[in-house]
Every structure is written in structure tokens, then in C-alpha cells.
């Protein structure tokens, strides 16, 4: 197969820029990185074939600066631009600017992005297309009387949401009539300052919902397929922490219905490229449209693991004008995949961001394990950007085995120098509710609220501490440097036991 492009500029940084550069390498496409002053030593710059500076560390001066990125594209002679996620990825003016300069934007058409940017407009389009939407107002709401009328139709509690919002920003729960006035004022003023548009609308609020999203691929001719769902309910303050596919709570008939709804949603807006349709689901097979994510998402690898498809390569081929080469009936979901997002954040301090130097790093590997990383040993995480270090993905034939495998991989994962969310993920993998698939969007709160599974019962602390001391006295776990090629045989056996000890030690640390 000829390469769809000769050269692609990646308008992003970190792990996703590395991910896209890898796809370029496999497809025989020259990759061009761009980097800010804070990213001179970043992994994506080292990985790509070429790299161009685009300005100071502040995102507005570099990764959000359309002119500087397009200037780098011109100088490099790139034919196409991949935006990654975040930054300019869902900015229709950026997509348009690329096309005006004769560059192919590897993503959806600007008009599809625009249509989904306004949530009221999105609801209108989806309702007309027959995609189920949450009960609520027809359009924007003007005042207290308006809100009160909708509330009496759908019943309390309700949610006032910013029309220009999304991703959970600019929302207010209202539980009774006397709360409307202040919530409405607060929501409108917040929407005005955050999004430059104070319009708001109303939806019925449901507690304990699940976040289910459907991955789609669409070509320029309107050919559209779905690649099953991802369950993204384990999140904290609208930051996803764990995603999986398939959802343990979606059966095959619900999958067919939600998949068909996602395809319909994309066709209604003339979507092209890889995209995601987000739904809120209850436990009874009901789901309602929330929003369209008009980009490749952070969690795309879990879909890749269960479908065997490469979504970035698919984006390239679609952007080059190819029609879909897979039919819906050829999409097979195999096994189960889980992704843990490893952030430079301290779960013991309310997930406080903790950038700094990674002094030691050993990434997990072995069967069914994938790590999409943006860092290396010795790397200093910049303070200016997202704290995502890497994504750890485990695949196995069944969900149970995928959890076991993820637990094993998390035990192998060694990051020193900065606190990370690895300890948090180990705890989630050990939660009976997670194992049983009892997932909802308030799962993490519940974990913090209750005593941790296996945590301190009187006297146990001392026992654990004593065992930990005894284990440590046998010597520290091996460093990656000490495990040289010649260390098989007798030394190999010793290493095995050290590894077991390292795993046990870490479990004890978690419980302390
Ligand atoms: C809701 C909701 C309950 N009812 N809408 C947050 C993200 C944005 N896409 C929509 N969000 C929600 N909308 C109604 N009518 C609850 C949430 C919500 C949520 C959704 C998905 C994942 C995590 C969440 C956490 C809190 C609230």
C-alpha cells in the first residue's frame, strides 16, 4: 500500500505526539514535530524525524498559536497536519486555516466541529436525527420562569448547562424551585467569562450515571462504522483515570443500539475521520446523547486493542481520501482492554500535580501490555502542560484476566523522583466493586469516602510495618541496570525472588 502522505506535521506534544509519529514511521511517512521552549528535551522531539521550534512555553504562544504552527508546516514541506487531542484539535478555525494553506487537516471537517461546539445546537440536530437526548429544554433558557417550566415538565433535580460548555465545565445542579435564581445567575456568569457566551439550557439531572462513549470511523463519502464502546466512568472532577472496552455493563443488543445511534449522530453532522459520541447511560439499557468529541481521544488504545485496528493509520487513510475498507460486520471485538492514565499527580494529596525530574523509570512489559509514554528516565516534566506521564494498557481474553494483568503491570511499573497515580490504580484494581463491574461516575469519591479496602485495622499497621522492615532487610529490589544480559542461571533465580518481594513490598506500601 503506498503511503497516504509523504510528510505530516504533528501539532501536539507528549505521548500523543509520539503515538502519531509511530504511526507515521510504520506508514513510511516522514514525521515533523513542533516544540515549545519548555519541550526542547521532550520525547516527541527526539522521536520525530524533524522538529521545529514554535515559541515560548505558554501554550498560547506555541501549541495554540496557529500562525507559528502553520509557518513550521510551510518550512518543513509537510502535506498534512495531525492535531492530536487538546490544544487546537477541535478548533474549526485551525482546521480551516490548514486547508486554506493547502494542508490536509487529519480530522473532521470544520463544519462538523462547529455544529458540535454549541450543545443546544447539537441537541437540536440529534433530536431531529432520532438520536435519544436527555429530557430538557428545546433551546436556551432565558430566565427563572423558563427554567421553572422545564423543571416542572421533566422533574427535579435538573442541571443548568452552558451552551458553549462541554466536558463537564459550566454546570449547576438545581434540586428545587428556590435554587433556580442563584444557580441560573451563577451558571450564566461563569459561561460568559469562561466561554464568551452566557447562553445556558436545562437537562434532567440523573445521579449515578455511567459514561459510555462509542468510537466511530467515518469516510468522506459518509461511510460510517462504530468500533464498540468504551466505559469511562472512573474519573475525578471530569478527568478520566481509567477506561476500558468493552464496557462490563453493555450487552450485545445494547451495543448494537448505542452503536447505531452513534453512527446516526455522525452522519447527521457530516462527520469524517475518527471520532467519539459520548452518552450517559443508566443501568437499564437506556442511554442519552451528551456530546461529540471531534478528535482522536486519549483512551483510543483500548479500542485498538479489542478491534486490532490502528486508529491513527485509519485517520491518515481517510484524510488521504480513501473510503472505508472495513464493513461493520467485519468489526470484531476480541477480549477486554483496560487503560490506566499515569499522571504526575499525588493521589495522597488530592491528586496535586507534581511535576519534576523522573530519576528512575522502569516501564512494564510482557504479554498483553502496552505503554504509550511521553517520558524517559532523567526527563523533567514541564509545569506548563498536562501532567500525563503515560498510559498503561492491558489486554486479555477476559475482563478478569485483564484486571489481573493490569495489576501485575502496575506492580512492575517503577517511577522515582515524582509521585504518580500508579498507587491509586493498584488500589482500584483491588476494589471488589471494580472487579464486579459496579462502575459509575462517583466511584472515586466513594473510594475516598470509605476506609480503603484492607486498610488499617487496629494492630495491623504495626504488623505490616514489621513485615516491610523484614523484607527490606533482604535488600532492595533490583535496578534495571543490574539486570544485565549475563545474569541468567543462579542469579536469575535470585532475581525472581527479589521481584516477588518487590511486588509484595509495594502491596504493603499501598496498605500503609
Ligand atoms: C450530566 C450528568 C447528569 N445528568 N447530564 C459531565 C461531563 C459532560 N459531558 C456531561 N456531564 C454530566 N452531564 C445530565 N443530564 C452528569 C454528568 C457528569 C459526568 C458525566 C460523565 C462522566 C463523569 C461525570 C461526572 C459528573 C457529572
Image: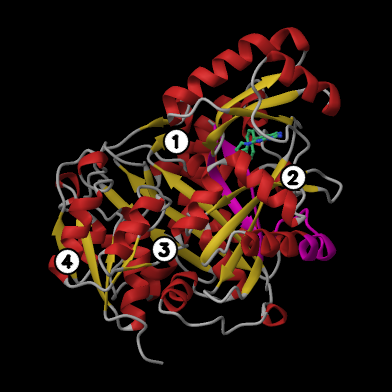
For label 3, the residue is 494
Q: Secondary structure at mark 3?
A: helix
Inter-mark Cα distance, 3 to 1: 19 Å
Q: Is residue 468 visible?
A: yes
Residue 36 placed where, x, y %? 18, 48
For label 4, the residue is 74
Q: Secondary structure at mark 2?
A: loop
- 442 or 377: which is nearer to us? 442
For label 1, the residue is 469
Q: Secondary structure at mark 4?
A: helix
Q: Secondary structure at mark 1?
A: helix
Q: Is residue 21 above or below residue 439?
A: below
Does label 3 or label 1 sit earlier along the sequence? 1
Report if the beta carbon of the residue with label 3 is closer than 8 angstroms to ligand 1: no
What residue is rendered at 16% in x and 63% in y? 51
Q: Is residue 413 visible?
A: no
Characterize the local packing of mark 2: few (<14), some (14-19) or many (20 or more) Cα atoms within 10 angstroms: some
Q: Which residues are magenta?
A: 228-257
Does label 3 or label 4 sit earlier along the sequence? 4
Does label 2 or label 3 sit earlier along the sequence? 2
- 500 or 222: which is nearer to us? 222
What residue is rendered at 61% in x and 43% in y? 121
Horizontally, is 507 left or right of 1 in the view? right
Residue 6 placed where, x, y %? 27, 81
Inter-mark Cα distance, 1 to 4: 60 Å
Find residue 133 and name its label.
2
Inter-mark Cα distance, 4 to 2: 43 Å
Does label 4 or label 2 sit earlier along the sequence? 4
* Numbered marks: total: 4
Does label 1 or label 4 sit earlier along the sequence? 4
Amino acid at each position: 500500500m503506498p503511503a497516504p502522505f509523504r510528510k505530516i506535521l504533528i501539532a501536539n506534544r507528549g505521548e500523543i505526539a509520539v503515538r502519531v509519529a509511530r504511526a507515521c514511521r510504520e506508514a513510511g511517512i516522514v514525521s515533523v514535530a513542533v516544540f515549545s521552549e519548555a519541550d526542547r528535551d521532550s520525547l516527541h522531539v527526539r522521536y520525530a524525524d524533524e522538529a521545529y521550534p514554535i515559541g515560548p512555553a505558554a501554550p498560547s504562544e506555541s501549541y495554540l498559536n496557529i500562525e507559528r504552527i502553520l509557518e513550521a508546516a510551510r518550512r518543513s514541506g509537510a502535506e498534512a497536519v495531525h492535531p492530536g487531542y487538546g490544544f487546537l484539535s477541535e478548533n474549526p478555525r485551525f482546521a480551516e486555516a490548514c486547508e486554506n494553506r493547502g494542508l490536509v487537516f487529519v480530522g473532521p471537517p470544520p463544519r462538523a466541529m462547529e455544529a458540535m461546539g454549541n450543545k443546544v445546537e447539537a441537541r437540536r440536530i440529534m433530536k431531529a436525527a432520532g438520536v435519544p437526548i436527555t429530557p430538557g429544554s428545546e433551546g436556551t433558557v432565558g430566565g427563572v420562569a423558563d427554567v421553572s417550566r422545564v423543571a416542572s415538565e421533566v422533574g427535579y433535580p435538573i442541571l443548568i448547562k452552558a451552551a458553549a460548555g462541554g466536558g463537564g465545565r459550566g454546570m449547576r445542579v438545581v434540586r428545587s424551585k428556590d435554587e433556580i435564581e442563584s444557580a441560573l445567575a451563577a451558571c450564566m456568569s461563569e459561561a460568559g467569562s469562561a466561554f464568551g457566551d452566557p447562553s445556558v439550557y436545562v437537562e434532567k439531572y440523573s445521579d449515578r450515571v455511567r459514561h459510555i462513549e462509542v468510537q466511530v470511523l467515518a469516510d468522506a463519502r459518509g461511510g460510517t462504522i462504530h468500533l464498540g464502546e468504551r466505559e469511562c466512568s472512573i474519573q475525578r472532577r471530569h478527568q478520566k483515570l481509567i477506561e476500558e472496552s468493552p464496557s462490563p455493563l453493555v450487552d450485545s443488543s445494547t451495543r448494537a443500539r448505542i452503536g447505531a445511534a452513534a453512527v446516526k449522530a455522525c452522519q447527521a453532522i457530516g462527520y469524517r475521520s475518527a471520532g467519539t459520541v459520548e452518552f450517559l447511560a443508566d443501568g437499564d439499557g437506556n442511554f442519552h446523547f451528551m456530546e461529540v468529541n471531534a478528535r482522536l481521544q486519549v483512551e483510543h488504545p483500548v479500542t485498538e486493542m479489542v478491534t486490532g485496528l490502528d486508529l491513527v493509520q485509519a485517520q491518515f487513510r481517510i484524510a488521504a481520501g480513501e473510503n472505508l475498507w472495513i464493513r461493520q460486520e467485519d468489526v470484531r471485538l476480541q477480549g477486554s482492554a483496560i487503560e490506566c492514565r499515569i499522571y504526575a499527580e499525588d493521589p495522597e494529596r488530592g491528586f496535586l500535580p507534581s511535576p519534576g525530574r523522573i530519576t528512575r523509570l522502569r516501564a512494564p512489559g510482557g504479554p498483553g501490555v502496552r505503554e504509550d509514554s511521553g517520558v524517559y528516565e532523567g526527563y523533567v516534566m514541564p509545569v506548563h502542560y498536562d501532567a500525563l506521564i503515560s498510559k498503561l494498557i492491558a489486554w486479555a481474553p477476559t475482563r478478569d484476566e485483564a484486571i489481573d494483568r493490569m495489576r501485575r503491570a502496575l506492580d512492575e511499573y517503577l517511577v522515582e523522583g515524582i509521585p504518580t497515580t500508579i498507587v491509586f490504580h493498584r488500589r482500584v484494581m483491588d476494589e471488589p466493586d471494580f472487579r464486579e463491574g459496579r462502575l459509575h461516575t462517583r466511584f472515586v469519591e466513594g473510594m475516598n469516602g470509605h476506609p480503603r479496602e484492607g486498610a488499617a485495622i487496629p494492630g495491623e499497621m504495626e504488623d505490616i510495618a514489621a513485615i516491610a522492615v523484614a523484607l527490606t532487610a533482604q535488600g532492595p529490589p533490583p535496578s534495571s541496570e543490574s539486570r544485565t544480559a549475563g545474569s541468567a542461571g543462579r542469579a536469575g533465580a535470585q532475581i525472581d525472588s527479589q521481584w516477588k518481594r518487590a511486588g509484595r513490598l509495594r502491596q504493603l506500601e499501598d496498605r500503609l
